[in-house]
Image: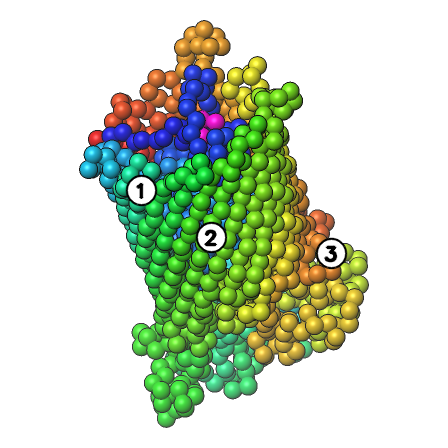
């Protein structure tokens, strides 16, 4: 088998280090490989054909060899090694999502996957999900990728919308002679998280070489990892909110029991010395729920104290996945036919079948009440007053005296002195393992087909290159959310009474509908489980139609060279439909009520580029050129937009090249942002500024403002005692979110200035340094939840009653309307708006050097290659609303944007084998954006290092093997509750599976 690569492509890969910011492995162009003929090619970032390999913007390249040798079955994991790529959706954080299980997405600079445009051979890829439009990188056949080119910078003038942050372009293989087989398997040191990939590529030419055919495919899977299977991560760690600064403690046990905890007196006041203090009993996990145990004062409060470690309770992290399960099968075919020496036709088609499985904890009710499924029993409950030791023991605590002869009984003997009547209400905290986990299974099928032509013709003595294509893509998907019980039915079934000697549901209408009583004291019957449990499904369809026509030529020739131009047009239509089943959409289930969302839009675009060489081969001007690009787009939704790019390059000498770019960019709102109906969602990232622990960590100015605004919002507010219903370790906060058809485009100005140094006196040394800056306005999105809660409402000097942002926060004045506590938040309203602005600044740097040992020491011990790539992003400032102060998010785990991120590697290659050591470094980051440094200890994550070792051995031109260890030193995420599990957006950049081994083999015939 002989994989063909044209001379310009070979030259590009050898010389790319001078123009790029990262390769996964060091690829140094040694002197003996430098003499290669140069033809005209098109590089990512421009459509002008050129005879220079200096890309118009800094370009990162990952080769096909690097993809195979990486040991990763997911391209997204490979890209995440790049310092300019930030974590978004990936295997570690998608398993507990409602619809994205198994997906991996690219996010340049942390600006979001919707602002990173993903291309295949310069053509747009379709979105992979109708609920959250972005491209799943797992739909790309990794073994058919020739290289990946990434540009971090505004490229809208060249490629259109979604390219604000940059472009990831997958250049695919087009030719091959023979059959290639590749297989790889891996497993963690804990014998889980298995990965497997097997694939093939076959190609040949027919009809005297005029017909070229290439077919390839692969199957890959990644298996499950659970937190309970990592002693380093289980049960976890939490903050001690009883001290300031808050220190770290082992994770407390949860009073949300897999059997039941009965909150007889619901308060956060410790019960050791007061008659009205918290009192709770639980079905003991040590006896499989067969006995009732009184909880200690630390575990009796509705929100357990940080020191709660009663062994009658358990750790809820037993349910948590560290990595979900996914599989994919991808088949691609490519064919080209040469009509003449200058004209050819091509067809490119891909079929993808991908699946993801994300386990999740069962449905639950909390001791506070409120939330999605508040659950309580009354004093006249039939099961409470029925036979059995558990019921008798529970009645004894409920009705038992609190004191004797006016003397308060010891806590271990104290009862609640409550009557067994309908007026007595006892909250029940429990998971519902009888239903099973709220697991999500996602299945997607995608078909993409493109046909087109390439050719050239002469006009006025000039050669004109032309290409055109039409592409159609469709995706159909379905998700099943298992074991999301019917809320009303659970409440009705638990509220059981004795009627005519029979245990029945109290609600007569429920009885008529077939209600089966649910026994939370002794355990429910199978019939009760079947009556209350349910599944929910969604179906989605995404369609994309694209057609494009491109021309490129030289207008005329100046003394410094030809003036190259490119121009063309593109038409595109996007359609999507997302439908949730009627029961799930009705808000009747323990799942987000999404409903139906759908829409479509189309856009017609025209663009033009010109490259003008000004000076060449002159003193202090080996090369001087400028480039201009512009694009006009007409959207059916937002009207007309325009973008431009200005670029200049100056090489005073052969050894140094300066480059500078200024560009504007736009992003049109997508279908979800425009047309999604308002629906229920949840977040665990919010902190209540009025909560006593958050208040304690506030500044003096914040405390002064909150004493006024919180008092206006919460009846009887006391900053020393108020414990909110949401925050760290508490139930999630309900949100009402949705789209806005009146959205406008996001707009950005981007700047890049850089230098590339390749000194002749140090052969094979390559250095690049580039400054980048983004100014984005009108960013689409809801107001950040903590910005809304703190900056815009409770820290605002505006009167609470007249502040429109405070009206978006729905407080429950009685604690019975969904807020769980008096003054708790029952809901926050967040809809899409063009409200935010973002400013990003930093530097990308790269140093690469390689040499043959025989040239240096006179002995042939092979060659060595060294590389260091780093990004210093010192500013990522977000303005939540026009006129508001910018909030710095650089170097925060909240935004997944480390200030420093670097990747260093060294490769030694001799004869048929090579070894590569690489180290990924992530700078220490701020853990909480909403609290002062004095409030948390630790306040920073600490530096993180991951070391990898990879080796390859080539038996001959047909057979090679590879093996490696990822995370050689078995590093886990930083020891802090905000990042400990590595399953959040920011924390997922840390490896949470531990040491991982892989082996692979490649065969060519």
Quadrant in which the N terminus appears: top left
Q: Residue beneath label 3, please? A: 885
Residue 611 falls left or right of residue 200:
right
Residue extending furthest toward the left? 207
Mark 1 and 3 residues: CB-CB less than 8 Å, in contact?
A: no
Q: Nearer the viewer, residue 887 or 379?
A: 887
- Which residue is painted at 33% across and 38% down in the image? 342
Q: Helix or strand or loop: what does disc 3 sit on?
A: loop
Binning the other alpha carbons within 10 Å of mark 2 as few (below 14), some (14 to 19) or many (20 upward) gives some
Q: Earlier in the sequence, mark 3 or mark 2?
A: 2
Q: Helix or strand or loop: what does disc 2 sit on?
A: strand
Q: Position of residue 443 (x, y in %)?
A: 33, 59
Q: Is 740 placed above or below 859 here?
A: below
Q: Residue beneath label 1, please? A: 344
- Which residue is painted at 45% across and 30% down in the image? 12
Circle nearer the viewer, 1 or 3: 1
Residue extending furthest toward the bottom? 500
Quadrant in which the C terminus appears: top left
Q: Position of residue 561 (x, y in %)?
A: 54, 29
Q: Residue beneath label 2, please? A: 569
Q: Would residue 357 be visible to someone looking at this image?
A: yes
Q: Would residue 246 be visible to someone looking at this image?
A: no
Q: Nearer the viewer, residue 521 or 573?
A: 573
Q: Position of residue 537 (x, y in %)?
A: 36, 68
Q: Nearer the viewer, residue 900 or 525?
A: 900
Q: Position of residue 5 (x, y in %)?
A: 35, 31
Place residue 891 in its image quadrant. top right
Q: Earlier in the sequence, mark 1 or mark 3?
A: 1
The stretch in magenta equals 12-16
Q: Earlier in the sequence, mark 2 or mark 1?
A: 1
Residue extending furthest toward the front? 460
Alpha carbon distance from label 3 to label 2 = 40 Å
């Amino acid at each position: 088998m002989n994989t063909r690569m044209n001379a310009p492509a070979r030259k590009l890969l050898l010389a790319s280090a001078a123009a790029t910011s990262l390769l996964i492995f060091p690829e140094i162009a040694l002197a003996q490989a430098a003499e290669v003929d140069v033809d005209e090619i098109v590089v990512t970032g421009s459509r002008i054909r050129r005879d220079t390999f200096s890309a118009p913007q800094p370009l990162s390249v990952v080769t096909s060899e690097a993809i195979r040798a990486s040991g990763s079955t997911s391209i997204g994991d490979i890209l995440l090694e790049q310092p300019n790529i930030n974590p978004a959706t990936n295997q570690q954080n998608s398993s507990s999502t409602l619809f994205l299980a198994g997906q991996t997405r690219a996010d340049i600079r942390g600006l979001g996957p919707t602002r990173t445009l993903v291309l295949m051979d310069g053509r747009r890829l379709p979105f992979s999900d109708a609920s959250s439009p972005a491209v799943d990188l797992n739909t790309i056949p990794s073994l058919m990728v020739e290289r990946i080119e990434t540009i971090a910078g505004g490229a809208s003038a060249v490629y259109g919308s979604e390219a604000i942050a940059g472009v990831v372009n997958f250049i695919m293989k087009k030719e091959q002679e023979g059959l290639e087989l590749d297989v790889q398997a891996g497993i963690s040191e804990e014998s889980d998280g298995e990965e497997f990939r097997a694939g093939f590529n076959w190609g040949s030419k027919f009809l005297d070489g005029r017909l070229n055919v290439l077919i390839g495919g692969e199957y890959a899977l990644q298996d499950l990892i659970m937190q309970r299977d990592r002693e380093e991560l289980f049960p976890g760690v939490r903050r001690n909110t009883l001290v300031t600064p808050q220190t770290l403690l082992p994770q407390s046990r949860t009073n949300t029991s897999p059997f039941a905890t009965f909150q007889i007196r619901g308060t956060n006041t410790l019960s050791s010395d007061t008659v009205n203090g918290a009192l709770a009993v639980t079905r003991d996990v040590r006896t499989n729920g067969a006995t009732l145990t009184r909880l200690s004062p630390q575990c009796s409060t509705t929100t357990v104290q940080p020191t709660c470690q009663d062994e009658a309770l358990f750790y809820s992290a037993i349910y948590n996945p560290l990595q979900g399960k996914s599989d994919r099968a991808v088949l691609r075919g490519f064919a080209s036919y040469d009509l003449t020496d200058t004209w050819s036709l091509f067809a490119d088609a891909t079929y993808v079948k991908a699946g993801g499985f994300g386990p999740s904890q069962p449905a639950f009710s909390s001791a506070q009440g409120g939330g999605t499924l508040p659950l309580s029993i009354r004093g006249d409950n039939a099961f409470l007053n029925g036979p059995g030791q558990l019921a008798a023991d529970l009645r004894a605590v409920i009705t038992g005296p609190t004191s004797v002869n006016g003397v308060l009984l010891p806590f271990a003997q104290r009862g609640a002195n409550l009557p067994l009547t309908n007026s007595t209400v006892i909250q029940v905290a429990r998971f519902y393992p009888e239903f099973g986990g709220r697991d999500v299974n996602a299945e997607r099928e995608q078909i993409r087909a493109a046909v087109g032509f390439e050719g050239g013709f002469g006009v006025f003595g000039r050669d004109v290159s032309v290409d055109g294509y039409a592409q159609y893509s469709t995706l159909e998907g379905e998700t099943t959310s298992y074991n999301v019980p019917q809320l009303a039915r659970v409440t009705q079934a638990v509220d059981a009474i004795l009627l005519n000697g029979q245990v029945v549901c109290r609600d007569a209408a429920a009885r008529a509908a077939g209600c089966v009583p649910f026994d939370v004291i002794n355990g429910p019957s199978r019939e009760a489980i079947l009556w209350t449990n349910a599944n929910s499904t969604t179906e989605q369809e995404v369609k994309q139609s694209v057609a494009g026509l491109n021309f490129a030529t030289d207008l005329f020739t100046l003394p410094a060279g030809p003036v190259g131009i490119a121009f063309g047009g593109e038409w595109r239509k996007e359609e999507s439909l997302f439908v949730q089943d009627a029961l799930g959409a009705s808000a009747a289930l323990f799942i987000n009520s999404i409903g139906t969302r759908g829409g479509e839009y189309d856009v017609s675009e025209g663009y033009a580029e010109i490259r003008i060489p000004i000076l060449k081969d002159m003193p202090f001007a080996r090369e001087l050129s400028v480039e201009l690009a512009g694009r006009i787009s007409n959207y059916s939704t937002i009207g007309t937009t325009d973008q431009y790019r200005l670029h200049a390059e100056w090489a005073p000498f052969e050894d140094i090249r300066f480059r500078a770019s200024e560009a504007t960019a736009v992003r049109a709102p997508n279908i979800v942002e425009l047309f999604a109906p308002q629906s229920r969602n949840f977040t665990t990232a919010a902190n209540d500024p009025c909560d006593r622990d958050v208040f304690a960590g506030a500044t003096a100015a914040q405390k002064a403002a909150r004493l006024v605004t919180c008092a206006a919002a919460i009846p009887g507010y006391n900053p020393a005692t108020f414990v909110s219903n949401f925050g760290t370790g508490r139930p999630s906060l309900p949100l009402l979110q949705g789209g806005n058809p009146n959205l406008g485009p996001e707009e950005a100005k981007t700047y890049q200035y850089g230098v590339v140094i390749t000194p002749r006196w140090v052969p094979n040394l390559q250095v690049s340094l580039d400054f980048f800056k983004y100014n984005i306005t009108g960013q689409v999105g809801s107001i950040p939840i903590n910005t809304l809660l703190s900056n815009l409402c409770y820290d605002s000097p505006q009167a609470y009653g007249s502040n429109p942002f405070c009206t978006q926060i729905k407080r429950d004045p009685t604690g019975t309307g969904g807020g769980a506590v008096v003054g708790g938040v029952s809901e926050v309203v967040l809809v899409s708006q063009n409200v935010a602005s973002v400013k990003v600044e930093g530097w990308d740097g790269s140093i690469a050097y390689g040499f043959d040992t025989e040239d240096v020491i006179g002995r042939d011990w092979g060659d060595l290659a060294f590389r260091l790539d780093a990004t210093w992003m010192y500013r990522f400032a977000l303005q939540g609303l026009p006129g508001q102060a910018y909030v710095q998010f650089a170097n925060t785990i909240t935004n997944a944007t480390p200030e420093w991120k670097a990747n260093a590697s060294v490769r030694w290659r001799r004869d048929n084998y090579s070894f590569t050591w690489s180290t990924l470094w992530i700078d220490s980051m701020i853990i909480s954006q909403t609290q002062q440094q004095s409030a948390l200890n630790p306040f920073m994550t600490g530096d993180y290092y991951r070391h990898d070792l990879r080796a390859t051995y080539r038996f001959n031109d047909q057979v090679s093997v590879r093996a490696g260890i990822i995370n050689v030193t078995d590093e886990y995420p930083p020891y802090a509750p905000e990042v400990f599990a590595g399953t959040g957006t920011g924390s997922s950049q840390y490896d949470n599976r531990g040491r991982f081994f892989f082996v692979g083999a490649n065969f060519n015939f």
